Image (cartoon, helix red, strand yellow):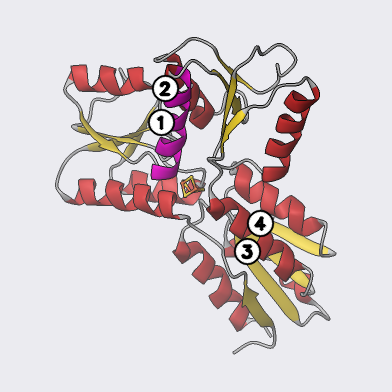
């Protein structure tokens, strides 16, 4: 046992949708099928290289999917991609997170009911592209937030699963200021909010805070930024190898948080390492 008191945030690490995507991918590979993922499965370089070591390749395009089975990531895809894979005869392992599917269905339903669909989210993000494409199948009046000034009534809103309620409230207020009362389908996923709240609460009470996850993971980076506002010593690391023991000189308490795309073994590796420090 080391001298540091290590506490883990109440909610940290792989969310339901990411864990499910990993499990489905490994189950398929274990069933002796050749498998690729359409795009990196998650924003975590260690996981992507572990999968590569098991022969699970990242394909960049539908045409590049030469394996028997193709895994669709938790972000989901535009429906045309599913159609194209089915036409090519690939087995589709659809790991689209059920929460993302809910947003896709809500957008399609609003469009079918004649609403102008506004997606509150990051333009160009694959999840947002997928949600928009599902809505566009039912009606062509869909857009990503940004053009609130131009959207005509009636307006229906869906939200990228990882957005904040604050962002949603701002958009609703901007529409209300124009006299528009939108129909809101709150499709925000609690996994993100729970991780953010728990990380902030812990960061306030420790000397040093470590946030574990891919540098290319936007939810991990957001956790890091939030913690940096609550604690003087916060580090974003991808693995235990990046830890510098001098970070803990004259410190006694360390908090750990991890993004929704960080698997359990990476968290355990960091905790075990900290427990060996003296
Ligand atoms: Fe799904 Fe929420 Fe994770 S939408 S992929 S459970 S962050």
Q: Residue at x 42, y 38 (%)?
A: 102
Earlier along the polypeptide chain: callout 3 or callout 2?
Answer: 2
Count neighbours of disc 4 (C-alpha within 10 A) and say few if under 14, some if 14 to 19, many if 20 or more.
many
Determine whether label 3 and label 2 are within 8 Å by CB.
no
Q: Nearer the viewer, mark 4 or mark 1?
A: 1
Numbered circle sitting on residue 134: 2
Q: Nearer the viewer, mark 3 or mark 2?
A: 2
Q: Tell me where residue 48 appears, x and y as whole percent.
A: 43, 45
What number is the disc on residue 196?
4
Distance in Å between CA atoms under marks 2 and 1: 7 Å
Given residues 37 and 123, the one toward you in this image is: 123
Is residue 159 positioned above or below 214 on the image?
above
Q: Which residue is mark 1?
A: 105
Is 191 displayed left or right of 100 in the figure?
right
Q: Earlier in the sequence, mark 3 or mark 4?
A: 4
Magenta span includes 108: yes
Q: Camera-side residue: 243 or 227?
A: 227
Q: Position of residue 225 (x, y in %)?
A: 75, 51
Q: Nearer the viewer, mark 3 or mark 1?
A: 1
| Label 4 near ligand 1 (CB < 8 Å) | no
Q: Secondary structure at mark 2?
A: helix
Instruction: Give yes or no for contact between labels 3 and 1 (Cβ–Cβ under 8 Å).
Output: no
Decide: few, some or many residues near mark 2? Use Cα within 10 Å; few <14, some 14-19, many ≥20. many
Position of residue 81 measured from the top left corner of the image (x, y, whole percent): 34, 21
Q: Secondary structure at mark 3?
A: strand
Residue found 47% across the figure and 55% down from its top: 15
Which numbered circle lies on residue 257? 3
Tell me if residue 139 can be seen: yes
**125 or 213: which is nearer to us?**
125
- Lower position in the chain sequence, tag 4 or tag 1: 1
């Amino acid at each position: 046992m080391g001298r540091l008191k290590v506490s883990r945030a109440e909610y940290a690490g792989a969310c339901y949708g990411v864990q499910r995507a990993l499990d489905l991918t490994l189950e398929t590979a274990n069933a002796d099928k050749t498998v690729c993922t359409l795009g990196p499965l998650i924003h975590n370089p260690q996981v992507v290289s572990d999968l590569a070591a098991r022969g699970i390749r990242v394909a960049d395009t539908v045409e590049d999917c030469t394996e028997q089975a193709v895994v669709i990531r938790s972000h989901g895809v535009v429906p045309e991609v599913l159609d194209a894979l089915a036409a090519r005869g690939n087995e589709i392992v659809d790991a689209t997170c059920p929460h993302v599917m809910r947003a896709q269905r809500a957008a399609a339903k609003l469009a079918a009911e004649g609403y102008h669909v506004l997606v509150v989210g990051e333009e160009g993000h694959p999840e947002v592209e997928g949600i928009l494409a599902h809505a566009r199948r039912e009606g062509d009046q869909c857009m990503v937030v940004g053009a609130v000034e131009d959207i005509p009534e009636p307006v229906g809103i869906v939200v990228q699963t990882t957005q904040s309620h604050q962002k949603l409230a701002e958009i609703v207020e901007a529409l209300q200021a124009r006299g528009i009362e939108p129909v809101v389908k709150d499709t925000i996923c609690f996994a993100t909010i729970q991780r953010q709240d728990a990380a902030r609460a812990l960061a306030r009470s420790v000397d040093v805070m470590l946030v574990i996850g891919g540098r290319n993971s936007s939810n991990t980076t957001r956790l890091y930024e939030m913690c940096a506002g609550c604690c003087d010593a916060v580090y974003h690391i991808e693995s235990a190898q990046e830890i510098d023991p001098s970070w803990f000189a004259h410190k006694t308490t360390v908090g750990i948080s991890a993004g929704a795309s960080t698997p359990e073994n990476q968290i355990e590796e960091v905790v075990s390492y900290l427990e060996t420090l003296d």
